[in-house]
Image (cartoon, rainbow, N blue to C red):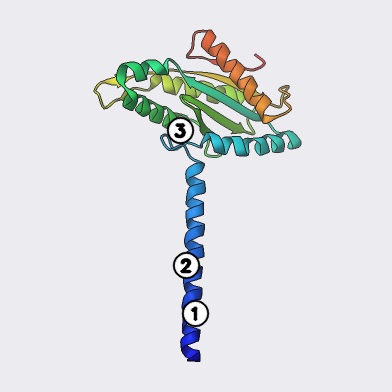
Amino acid sequence: MLVETGLRTAAHAREATLAVKALAEETLSLEQRSSRDALTGLLSRAYLDAELPAVFETAQARGLYLTVALGDIDHFKRVNDTRGHLAGDEVLSQVARTLAGAVRRSDWVARYGGQEFLVVLAGTAREGGRAVTERIRRKVEELLVPVAAGGAVRVTISLGQATLGGGGSFDSAQALLAAADACLNRAKRGGRNRVVTHGE
């Protein structure tokens, strides 16, 4: 009787351990999924909103540069309207891969919303950030995206950039992003397919 009770107790303990392990794996999987945009595989806006303030505070406290670049695919609505939403999704995916391939592994690229992307370059001064942002603009301009309906689509991207450090003073991550957004709006008003940098 004691042996049977011991075996049952051991079996229950194993089952409980397996259940806890399965729950932990499921939680990790959910966290990983929520940190990534489903379509592009880039970091998600939710992850960015949660993590960027801490990155900003660390850079500010240690006197490090932090450059952000906000990009918007030019006339993206036209792609959806004339080629369909599947073509639009393919353009978003290809542009996302292009952005991710144009930065260091330590940099962040996120889908900020719709056809907008955010690049976070830690430890990068304004001039270095400008070189990366211009490289991104050029690579997107060179893209030829094949689409399921046939043919291919060309797109361009407008980018606004702002840097903490080196004369760029901001009191929060939100203020840094707002400066990049203002530069993005200037790029779009200035004719699109261009980079505008805060402070230049």
Quadrant for the C terminus in the image: top right
Q: Secondary structure at mark 2?
A: helix
> Which residue is more in the foreground, 21 or 164?
21
Tag 3 near tag 1, CB within 8 Å: no
Point 62% across, 25% down: residue: 177
Q: CA distance from mark 3 to mark 1?
A: 51 Å
Q: Secondary structure at mark 3?
A: helix
Can you tell which mark lies on residue 18? 2
Q: CA distance from mark 1 to mark 2?
A: 12 Å
Where residue 187 sits in the image (x, y, percent)?
Answer: 54, 13
Which amino acid is tagged 2?
Leu
Which amino acid is tagged 1?
Ala
Going by the image, does 180 lie left or right of 61?
Answer: left
Where residue 128 sits in the image (x, y, percent)?
Answer: 60, 26
Point 62% across, 39% down: residue: 51
> Which residue is more in the foreground, 102 or 154?
154
Point 61% across, 38% down: residue: 50
Q: Residue furthest top?
A: 190
N-terminal label among 3 and 1: 1
Could you tell me if residue 107 is visible in this image? no
Can you tell which mark lies on residue 127? none
Q: Nearer the viewer, mark 3 or mark 1?
A: 1
Q: Which residue, given by chain and number where applicable, does mark 1 sit on? A: 10
N-terminal label among 3 and 2: 2
Point 61% across, 16% down: residue: 182
Q: Secondary structure at mark 1?
A: helix
N-terminal label among 1 and 2: 1
Q: Which residue, given by chain and number where applicable, does mark 3 sit on? A: 101
